[in-house]
Image (spheres, rainbow, N blue to C red):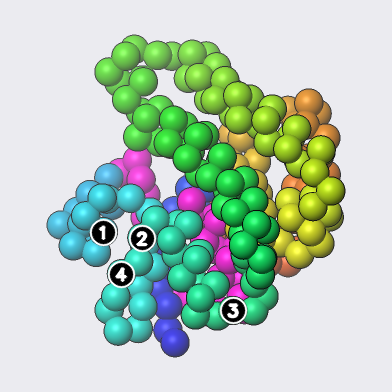
């Protein structure tokens, strides 16, 4: 199966999907877009993804998949190993909950279009935007850290000793945090898991600085 990933190197949602593809051992064509140049708002891109967002995963038959968590779950259904969701229902619910904390609580408030709106429409300067970003990360990471630290199901990674969808989300978010100099020292479990993920080749290759459009 030939896959094409339409994405942006610094997009955390794109980073999640790159890591998932790498963990599954799937080759894909990397198609880069510059978000600040509105390259995902062209007619050609909007035909693929009417939301004008990244990532979009293009399948060999022309099917277009969007929304990173939906793409990741599709990958897990089509290419079951290594599994990104646990076998048991309670485990899957836990991993999804951790994933959604980042994908639904942090990302929607801190993605590029929101930060751009704050700057262009609300007059926020760099200091205010950084404070906004850090506030929403901290609000969720405090609870995320508590859940990880208190739960025996937390292992080397967010859920046990193999990476799951929750780790894809966490890894990508921490990389996004680096742009705003957010210190992980208040969240030792998160910091430990990120360090462990960063040693894995699949995650190293998915990290923003490793992408061809990062130069």
Residue matched to label 4: 64
Q: Which residue is mark 3?
A: 80
- Label 3 with label 1: CB-CB less than 8 Å: no
- Residues at discs 1 and 2 in contact (Cβ within 8 Å): yes
- Is residue 31 a member of the stretch shown in magenta? yes
Secondary structure under tag 2 reads: strand
In the rendered structure, are the residues bearing label 2 and label 3 in contact, judged by CB atoms less than 8 Å apart?
no
Question: Does 137 appear above or below 81?
Answer: above
Count neighbours of disc 2 (C-alpha within 10 A) and say few if under 14, some if 14 to 19, many if 20 or more: some
Within-10-Å neighbours for mark 3: few <14, some 14–19, many 20+: few
At a point 32% along the width and 25% down the height, the residue shown is 117
Which of the two discs, 3 and 4, labels the residue nearer the N terminus? 4
The residue carrying mark 2 is 66
Q: Are marks 4 and 1 in contact (CB under 8 Å)?
A: yes
Left or right: 24 as drawn, with respect to 200: left
Q: CA distance from mark 4 to mark 2?
A: 7 Å
Label 1: how many residues lie within 10 Å, few (<14), some (14-19) or many (20+)?
many
Cβ–Cβ below 8 Å for labels 4 and 2?
yes
Q: Is residue 25 magenta?
A: yes
| Res 32 visible | no
Identify the image quadrant of the N terminus.
bottom left
Q: Position of residue 205 (x, y in %)?
A: 65, 63
**Tag nearer the camera, 3 or 4:** 3
First in sequence, mark 4 or 1: give its number: 1
**Picture quadrant where residue 32 is located:** bottom left
Mark 4, secondary structure of its residue: strand
Tell me the magenta residue range.
13-37
Q: Nearer the viewer, residue 127 or 187?
A: 187
């Amino acid at each position: 199966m030939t896959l094409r990933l339409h994405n942006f190197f610094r997009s955390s949602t794109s980073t999640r999907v790159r890591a998932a593809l790498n963990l599954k051992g799937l080759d894909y064509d990397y198609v880069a877009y510059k978000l600040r140049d509105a390259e995902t708002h062209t007619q050609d891109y909007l035909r693929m993804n009417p939301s004008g967002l990244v990532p979009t995963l293009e399948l060999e038959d022309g099917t277009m998949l969007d929304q990173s968590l939906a793409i990741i779950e599709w990958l897990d259904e089509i290419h079951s190993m290594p599994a990104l969701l646990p076998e048991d229902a309670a485990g899957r619910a836990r991993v999804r909950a951790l994933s959604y904390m980042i994908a639904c609580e942090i990302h929607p408030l801190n993605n590029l279009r929101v930060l751009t709106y704050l700057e262009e429409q609300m007059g926020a300067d760099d200091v205010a935007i950084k404070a906004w970003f850090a506030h929403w990360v901290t609000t969720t990471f405090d609870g995320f850290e508590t859940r990880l630290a208190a739960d025996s199901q937390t292992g080397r990674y967010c859920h046990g000793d193999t990476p799951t969808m929750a780790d894809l989300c966490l890894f990508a978010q921490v990389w996004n945090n680096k742009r705003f100099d957010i210190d992980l020292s208040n969240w030792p479990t998160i910091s430990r898991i990120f360090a462990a993920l960063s040693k894995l080749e699949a995650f190293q290759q998915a990290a923003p600085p490793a992408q061809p459009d990062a130069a």
